[in-house]
Amino acid sequence: MFPTSTQKKHWMFTDELELQRLREEANQKFIAKHRNGIEDVDGYFLTIAEERIFLKNYELQMRDLCNKFNPAMPKAVIGTSFHYFKRFYLHNSVMDYHPKEILVTCVYLACKTEEFNVSISQFVANIRGDRDKASDIILNNELLLMQLLNFHLTIHNPYRPVEGLLIDIKTRSQLAYPERLRPGIDELLEKVFLTDACLLYAPSQLALAAVLHAASKIHENLDAYVTETLLGPNTQQRLVDLIEAVRKIRSMVKSVEAPARETVKIIEKKLEKCRNQENNPNSQIYKQRMQEILDEDDEKEMERYKRLMQKHAQVDAQTLGIDRISSPGN
Amino acid sequence: MDDQACPRCKTTKYRNPSLKLMVNVCGHALCESCVDLLFLKGSGSCPECDVPLRRSNFRVQLFEDPAVEKEVDIRKRVLKDFNKKEEDFSSLNEYNDYLENVETIIFNLTNNIDVMETNKRIEQYKRDNRELILKNKIKIGREELELEELLEEEKHIDQIRKKEIVKEELELKRKKIKEKEDLIDELMFSNQDAKKIVNEFAQISQAAAKEMESSKPTAPPRASQFSTGIKFGRTSQQSAYHIPIIEDGPLYTYKEPEIVVDGPEPPVWSEIETGRYIVHMRPETVEERAGGYTANIACMRALQEAFMGLYHVSRPEQGQSS
């Protein structure tokens, strides 16, 4: 139930300004930590605007990955992946964790939480490039992702509310062939996830916006259904709020545009320099750290073995010692 | 001792040192050979009082006076039934009256006073208190079992202790011998004053003896620990008979889950069927129904989710909380 969920409690925000503020905090925190006396902050580190463009680019990539996924994935997995991705970069900087890694991890985790069963090998078959490395990255990042999402893994997607609204429209409104609305609904919901609307509005509101958008596309009018049937009488203020929400969602969706490829390339280059090398699987530091973790495990094994041997030696010494003492008495 | 004699064949202990007197329930003694002779067939009557007896009931006479044997026998038999305990009575006086009554019965039976009457009394008592007798019998049986176990354990501990003592003594001896040898060695090869060496060794052996003494008291506590340990063992055994009591928490009471809608009221269950909502759902297949799925569950869920949160408005104070 959405009204009692962690989604409403922890991941619904007042407006876009608040989201902006949180992202700024994450950005500033990273810069403060990794500045090390660098003068030209804006020139060296990514700015908020650059981060936003970069993330938008990866959101588009995520959409393509999900749509081309084999076996075809349910829509709820796509919605959940986008939720995770957006939530993650609210509190973390792009420079700290590269989005191309977080992206695949989000999709992989969403497959699990939405009960879409794919194995890791099946999953990486959908990714270009080195697959062994990809599966390593995904599995290494999975727990980190869950932790940084604060283990709030249940996502309420707008897809089921859409079904509910369609059933309700079929039952209680005069609209002919409501199934005609489907293409319009799908179009809007796909774009909705490229905006921050899912962090600001309830899934049922997104669903209603999608249904109304689809209705206007086929030149039908559902206003009467919304005002009279759905909300009923004596809900003037509610109606105003709801209409405002729907209007806002639709305008957010309209403003979506893909970032220019050149800008993304420039940012990518800049990021390679300023990103946190500890989280870069290609970097020397990362490899060194992984090696250290492995060595540590080995060392622990060795130590245990050593202790065991010592104990054995002690026991041996004791038994032998007793023999030595008792022999002269005989 | 020597005047012990079989009343039938007049053999005495003096003439036959291996004489064994046997008694039966009537309390008259017979020697072993007479029993063999008279009760060849397994049963017969007592040569003195003509009471019918069984051979298997003969046993060796323990007391000099065969009358005592008889009493012991009777007492055993009577107490089997008169097995009430002090706890079974409300007052001490009642208990004492009961004990006296029991003694009277035993006395009467032993001395053949009103035998018929007394037997009747016993029968009456048995009938009146059948349940209590049975209950106490079980209890006594259990106690006896515990006692046996206890004895067994004590025996075992005793053995261990004995072994330890033997071991200690052996060690002590060995030590003494070794000390002596050391002393002699020292006297033979050392250049020091002989007196001094002897003194030194005496001191060492004294210290060792003291040490032994101080270490000795550690043994008795161990023994007492055992004896207390028995007590613990016994109580734990007793508790093992009881079924552990599982404390029940407060009873579960069903509470209707509270559904927060934050939107227009979704339809209720009856409306799903009658309000033609269900018409727009794919009906469940037979297999799905076997698994517990029905179309109206999915229908209800979709509708509820569609209506929930429609009134959601992010107010500034909500945003601050995260």
Image (cartoon, helix red, strand yellow):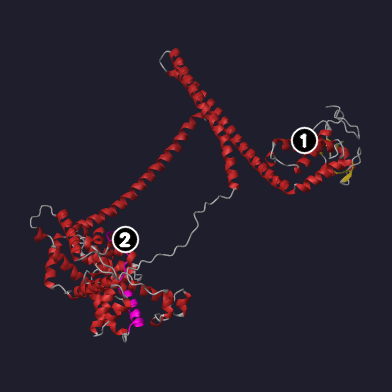
The residue at which mark 1 appears reads as B100
The residue at which mark 2 appears reads as A151
Is residue B312 found left or right of B243 in the rendered image?
Answer: left
Residue B24's tag is: none
Q: Is residue A161 magenta?
A: yes
Q: Is residue A168 above or below residue A107?
A: below
> Which stretch did the figure color magenta?
A147-173
Is residue A78 at least partly visible in the picture? no
Measuring from the top left, give residue B53's x and y in whole percent. 87, 43
Measuring from the top left, give residue B295's x and y in whole percent. 42, 77
Q: Chain of mark 1?
A: B
Is residue B17 found left or right of A258 in the rendered image?
Answer: right
Disc 1 element: helix
Is residue A255 found left or right of B11 in the rendered image?
Answer: left
Distance (Cα) linking label 2 and label 1: 81 Å
Q: For the point 26% across and 58% down, which residue is it?
A: B321
Task: Specify the amino acid type for callout 2.
Answer: Phe
Task: Specify the amino acid type for callout 1.
Answer: Glu
Residue B316 sits in which quadrant? bottom left
Q: Is residue B25 magenta?
A: no
Q: Chain of mark 2?
A: A
Q: For the point 77% across and 47% down, which residue is it?
A: B128
